Image (tube, rainbow, N blue to C red):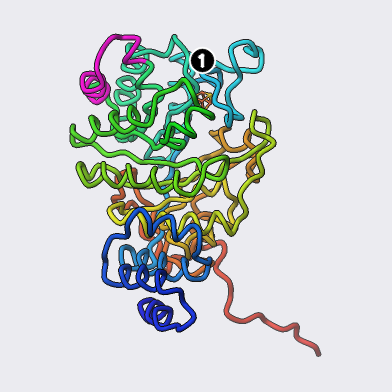
Amino acid sequence: MEVSDNLRVLINDPQLLPELKDIAEKVLHNQRISFDEGVLLYEKAELGYLGVLANYIREQKHGDKTYFNRNFHIEPTNLCVYDCKFCSYSRLLKQRADGWEYTMEEMLDIVKKYDDQPVTEVHIVGGVLPQYDVPFYSELFSRIKAHRPDLHVKALTPVEYHYIFKKAKIDYATGMKMMKDAGLESIPGGGAEIFHPEVRDLIAKDKCTGDQWLAIHEEWHKLGMRSNATMLYGHIEKYWHRVDHMEQLRQLQDRTGGFQTFIPLKFRNQDNQMSNVPESTVVEDLRNYAIARIYLDNFDHIKAYWAMISRTTAQLSLNFGVDDIDGTLDDTTKIYSMAGAEEQHPAMSTKELVELIQHIGRHPIERDTLYNVVTNYKDFQFEETAKPSYYKLPVIN
Ligand code: SF4
């Protein structure tokens, strides 16, 4: 059965609420859904319905293709001048003994560890501290590029950029141009949390506002560069805050086209100031991926971080609008494990990632940061796992 047949069967279901039928018709005809319809999906749509719509869009855009990349992270520090309530990662300055603060040379040593490995991206994010400023990051980016020109530098979020530009007394446009000239090639999606101040002021009060986050991405896009976007969901926000967040991203994307990927981030409640807030269920996680796929019609990709939601949920998400499950990571990030994610030492070999995708009948593609194909793994079998199609029986004389 074609994926569009599933959608038509759904539309013809006499039990379906008329307003959900209208949304399904819009999806079938490639039309954008409204803010109110986004909220309605969160309030009324069941998982099965959302899966049919989201998978239809996913397969229209990408067929079975499922992307991953080979990357590693550098987290310069886990100390931070801010105090976000959901953050399990930051050790405030007073807990400095539990923290790390890498020097420039230590960070370059991490890069050099990968010299003989076919990684394509270094992802740099961490806490905010005064010594990591515009001159520091400019030098870091340019030295990474000088050492290994083929390694894509994806680094820092508007939280860091807002802080370091303010300190340097330069505007966003000037600052982003300086970063680009130093070797920065794209910016990751972090720091977005929930844009609406009603929520943001309660969970992430002092760092950049939602408008500032969007303005920094806009300046970056104006330079012809690409970035990602995230949303931290499943805590104290209401459904309409999520839709408001995605609406603002959709509007910016209409203006610039600079976003590549939207990444919903599940709130985890371990070891932070919001440990009393229960976590969302897997069903809610899958509903959220699906609604993001339906709402963000002008985003090419929806990504699930396997390290944050577990390998099994990442596999499931591939039927709910997700087409990218991030990278090999090589146990270089502590951000998810410190928040209580199932993966405490997140690392997957390329073979494991490929097989994870193949096991649910999707088509693995290793991509670079900008979604150029590095290796197409369609029908590829790693030699050591090639299984015989029959097994010899013991010979009995
Ligand atoms: S979420 Fe980021 S900005 Fe907020 S306290 Fe944690 S490391 Fe700092």
* Residue 1 shows in the view: no
Q: Residue at 80% across / 88% down in the picture?
A: 396
Q: Principal SS element in the magenta part?
A: helix
Q: Nearer the viewer, residue 316 or 194?
A: 194
Q: Amino acid at mark 1?
A: Val
Judge whether 234 appears above or below 129 on screen. below
Q: Position of residue 114 (x, y in %)?
A: 45, 33
Judge whether 79 appears above or below 43 on screen. above
Q: Quadrant of the C terminus?
A: bottom right
Judge whether 119 appears above or below 95 on screen. below
Q: Residue at 31% across / 49% down in the picture?
A: 371
Q: Residue at 61% across / 49% down in the picture?
A: 280
Q: Position of residue 199 (x, y in %)?
A: 49, 34
Asked if residue 170 is among those painted magenta in the image, a careful observer would answer yes
Q: Is mark 1 within 8 Å of ligand 1?
A: yes
Res. 175 image quadrant: top left
Furthest residue toward bottom: 397
Element at label 1: loop
Asked if residue 266 is among those painted magenta in the image, a careful observer would answer no
Res. 64 image quadrant: bottom left
Residue 167 as seen in the image, left or right of residue 382: left
Residue 173 as seen in the image, left or right of residue 365: left
Q: Quadrant of the N terminus?
A: bottom left
Q: Residue at 32% across / 73% down in the picture?
A: 25
Dot 1, how many residues are within 10 Å of its Cα: few (below 14), some (14-19), or many (20+)?
Answer: some
Per the rendered image, the range of residues in magenta is: 164-180
